Amino acid sequence: MKRRTFMMSAAGAAAGMAILPRMSFAAEGVIDWYTSSDSNILDFWTNIVKPAFEAAHPGVTINLVDAGDGAGIIAISERAMAAKQTNTDPQADFFESADPLLPAGAIEAGIFVNIKEAGLSNYSKLNPAGIQSDYSLPYRGSQVLLAYDTTKLDPADAPKSWDDLVTWIKANPGQFVYNRPDKGGSGGNFVRRAIHQANGLDPSMFTVDNYTQEFGDETLGKAWELLKDIAPSLYDNGAYSSGNTQSIQLLSQGVVTMVPVWSDQVLQAIDQGVLPDTTGLVQLQDLALVGGFTRSVVLETGTNRDAALQLADFMLSEEIQSAILTELGGFPGVSWDHIDPELRERFADIVPQSIPTFPGGAWEAAINDGWYRNVAPNVDRNS
Amino acid sequence: MTELAEGEARPLIEKTGSRRPTGLLLVAVPVLLMAWLIIWPIFNAFARTVWRPDADGDYGFNLSSYVFFFSDQYSINNLTITLWTTGMCALLLLVICLPIAIYLRFSHGRLPAYVQALAIFPMFVPSIILAYAFIRVLGPNGMVDILLNSVGLPKIRTPYLTPWGPVIGLVWDNIPLTVLILLAGLGSVSNQAIEAARDVGARRLQVFWYIILPRISNSVLVAISFAVLGIFSSFTLPYLLGPASPEMMGPFMNRTFREVNDPLNAITQAVITFCFCIAFGLFYVRSVARNQGK
């Protein structure tokens, strides 16, 4: 009996300890950093940014944490909003990629630092095209390009405009695939390029707060018609891959000839031999495919707010901005004038003069839902 | 010593009213955890979809999200493909796993041991690895195509990104559990019963139909309800191998919640999914209860 009682109380105590909320406090001098990006970004921070920053700022370290995806970052922001109400520590200082507009009301709640007014010495170097909010820092960018197999398509014949591309897709049925717009930015921004095409090639038509039901239905509706038109000529009579990587996989298996890809991902894929050297890259010249900046956010209520701002400033330094080009294959967040001329020369081919962008917010939900309802079905896959 | 001698021998299972609530205490932690982490969210989700504020902010009974789901052809298509996938998987699982289980039960030696190891193997393969292996083998220009091509045969029509993709992946993934449950059920079929049937001239099919099947019908039910519960709400394989549309409920819910930022409809979809799962779950509970009653 005694042993049984002992076992029971031990088991009970163990179970109790397991379900007790783990009490922990953010440490002074350790920046709690979260990302929602892919593993190549986490690698970049682990191998390049973290050592460089810690060497330049003795006594400060960065605790790199993968938050999974955008929803993971939003959940941590919600926690920070709740913590702010009770004046407790949010245990987060820096979001590598976040939209300060999400969760709704976060800026009003005062959990994010107004970066524009935080006095960063490098803030004025930022590329104005990337600035979407005073509360976020567009420190890196990448753009969607078309990658193709030069053994099947002569670079001289590669499409240079949307109309050429559509003509090529229809003339070569089954040789083009793009991924579902919510499952990866390469397909997502191909869809956004179609929206630009359907609405007079004017990216300024769409802003982060001008979405209304009627305007959205009208502008997006025209784009769905364009995409439905090419659907039967896509891979497998209208199949859509389930992510950026899967598109690259289809290209590497020689199943399709052309896919839209992220610039940084495709450069790495070619570098690592996932894609052969015979992979060609082309950008549409009438209006480039949409690119995007990744924006960092600093938490106002974090224990290490000031150190996190130093990190934000550090990200805009020439050292890191050059590394984004050379190590990551991304675009710098600062204007081209602030980049080493030698690098500017070297990457001139893949770097466009302008990067059309598309706003997030309500547009994103409308595009994601509208595409699934209008474009993805309506295809007889067996025909 | 004297105390023990005076009292009568303590029965193995106490039936007196004064027994200590030790057993109840032991199950209290898991039951409370289940109530907190599973049962409460279910009621909470259900309540939040039917009792919510209208446009003016007044709380009231409101079924509009359910009306929307069942009047929206897109949602209905997703539910239909989920039911189709689940049914097709259950059927294929039975067709594949019953012969394996019967073979393993009635044969001896080395070979059945290898077959069993092979049948259990999928349990140790994470589904994301399975999905990528599937793409490499059955995908377009995959291994199968390369093999066929080398002997001059045409390529297969690949199941990748079609409704058959998730079916193949899910069946493979669920073979171990189904085989194990069926094998356990076959343990209750005695060799004597089969020998007796053979003695009176029963053929193989008759032995299966009249002797084996009635004894394992419960296990079949349990195996199928286990598989169906997992398949109905599966996520990874339909997400990676299935078509963009129609999509199964798992990816559909996830997308509605995260990508469309529409928690209300996502919760509604979850409640509807749960209602289907509870129907399958009831089969399982009933068959277990019937077994215990025996």
Image (tube, rainbow, N blue to C red):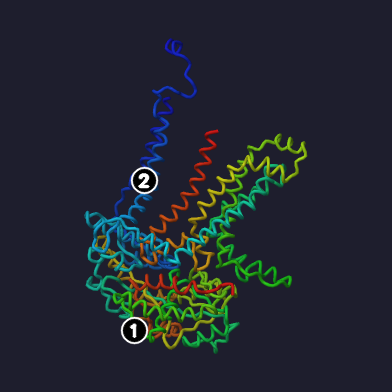
The quadrant of the image that shows the C terminus of chain B is top right
**Residue displayed at 47% across by 87% down:** A161
Q: Amino acid at mark 2?
A: Trp
The x and y percentages for residue A146 are 49, 80
Image vertical order of residue B22 relative to residue B194, above or below = above
The x and y percentages for residue B200 are 77, 37
B245 lies left or right of A105: right
Seen from the viewer's position, the closer of residues B211 and A165 is B211
Seen from the viewer's position, the closer of residues A358 and A149 is A358
**Residue displayed at 50% across by 66% down:** B246
Which image quadrant for residue A55? bottom left
Q: Which residue is mark 1?
A: A337
Indicate the secondary structure of the residue bearing disc 2.
helix
Residue A237 visible to an observer of this rendering: yes
| Residues packed near mark 1 inside 10 Å, few (<14), some (14 to 19) or many (20 plus) | few
Indicate the secondary structure of the residue bearing disc 1.
helix
Mark 1 to mark 2: distance in Å? Answer: 57 Å
| Residues packed near mark 2 inside 10 Å, few (<14), some (14 to 19) or many (20 plus) | few
B227 lies left or right of A311: right
